[in-house]
Amino acid sequence: MSRYRSRPRSAGHRLTAAAIATVACACVSVPQADAAGTDTEPVVSRGVTIPAFYTPPAQLPAANGTLIRKESLPLGLSLPGLDGRPLPGTATRLMYKSTDSSGRPVAVTGAYIEPSAQWKGNGPRPLVAVASGTMGQGDQCAPSYALEHPLTVSGETLSVGYDNLAIYRLLATGAAVVVTDYVGLGATDRLHTYVNRVDEGHAVLDAVRAARALPGTSLTSDSRVGLYGYSEGGGATASAAELQPTYAPDVHLAGTYAGAPPADLTAVMKGIDGSALVSALGWAINGFAQTYPEMRSIAEANLNDAGRKALAGTSTMCVGDAVIRYGFTRSTAWTTSGKSVADIIAAEPGAQAVLDEQRLGTLKPTGPVRVATGVEDDIVPHRQARQLAVDWCRKGGNVTYEAVDLPNLGDRILTNHLAPLITDQGSAISWLTDRLEGKPTASNCWTMPVQR
């Protein structure tokens, strides 16, 4: 079976015009690897050697959510408990089967954490699937890897597992947690399909299935399931809540938290261009060019040498090194015409159709959802996130909307985006915990005047 596999990565790697067609990946055949070990050449991404566990086998099982392999995962931040159990819990690295937006089978990695804390709420111990915020596109940026290495600093990589805080707070409630690495982040057979709503929604739902299939856990068939995500993660959980009825009817959702969701990628592209997180443009183009031929051809036709280098560079970077290398660059410097990437896509019906297909809010979400967005957020713009809540309300969704009203903490430097992540986190976890206990919640759609 022929597949994409990341080649050894290093800083300064150049993306030639021919390489755009494969989006910085080389197409090679990989021997089958049914166990954690593999005899393939190790993948090195910006100075970090990716464990052999992350190399998928050549053949994948048929059923979505099937557990492909597992191994013990040492948490980077862990303490011995008084009863002999580690705090906050015992972690297992996972690989499981999912299906991408093209209908093809794909291996996804992640982690399950069995908490040491007891669940004191109603019913058996629940499960929360955590979808991490933007980590980058290099395999070394995977959230499961960040659980083992909360801070990675090398000559080429700077990565911080900032969502570990939310994960540990959820574990403290007694809920079990499963974390997805998304499609292509960690697993070394392709690039991460950044903000692809179908890939991410499927990866979240199949993580729940994989956690349920893991032997030796305290989960039962009656364990309630919640979803938690902010930023990229908020888009992933929002997508999962929309796709659940058709893709995973066996996964019943007690509640979904979607913080700062990138619901309208056209608006988000304009928000991040020229900001500290402009590298997210590169991650999005890389991911969509890998999946959609029309996006690949537009990249080939419109990117100049600087743009091609940027796509190659960002494809191996985590957020920290990407901010340092590309922060505050405008995409007009990456194009042959001097037009922004957003303007070029808007002028190309095929490319715009790709972004329109990613729009969240066209389907009614399953179960109660909580949407929170900072009113000053200028990275994932507040207005488009609020519009998602409005769209869901129009469809009869049980929506709790929270506008996080903080002062402007600095234009386009990430502070307006990251501050609500921290200040609203306690309320978000409290709301989700109530849903996991089976407590009802009422929509506050009436607080949002409908804007057309």
Image (cartoon, rainbow, N blue to C red):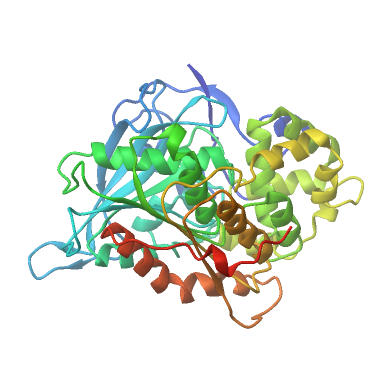
- Looking at the image, residue 353 lies above or below residue 58: below
On the picture, is 256 further left or further right than 288? left
The residue sitting at 52% across, 51% down in the picture is: 396
| Image-quadrant location for residue 161 | bottom left
- Looking at the image, residue 67 lies above or below residue 172: above
The residue sitting at 60% across, 47% down in the picture is: 360
Image coords of residue 250 (percent x, y): 33, 35
On the picture, is 417 further left or further right than 53? right
Judge by depth and name the residue closer to the eye, 244 or 337.
244
On the picture, is 201 further left or further right than 221? right
The residue sitting at 29% across, 58% down in the picture is: 436
On the picture, is 344 further left or further right than 176? right
* Quarter that holds the C terminus: bottom right
The residue sitting at 48% across, 76% down in the picture is: 423
Image coords of residue 434 (percent x, y): 31, 64
Judge by depth and name the residue closer to the eye, 185 or 439.
439
Q: Is residue 12 visible?
A: no
Image coords of residue 431 (percent x, y): 37, 66
Image coords of residue 251 (percent x, y): 34, 40
Q: Is residue 329 visible?
A: yes
Judge by depth and name the residue closer to the eye, 391 or 327.
391
Residue situated furthest top in the rendering: 1
Q: How many marks?
A: 0
Judge by depth and name the residue closer to the eye, 385 or 185.
385
- Looking at the image, residue 135 lies above or below residue 31: below
Residue situated furthest left in the rendering: 83
Residue situated furthest right in the rendering: 337
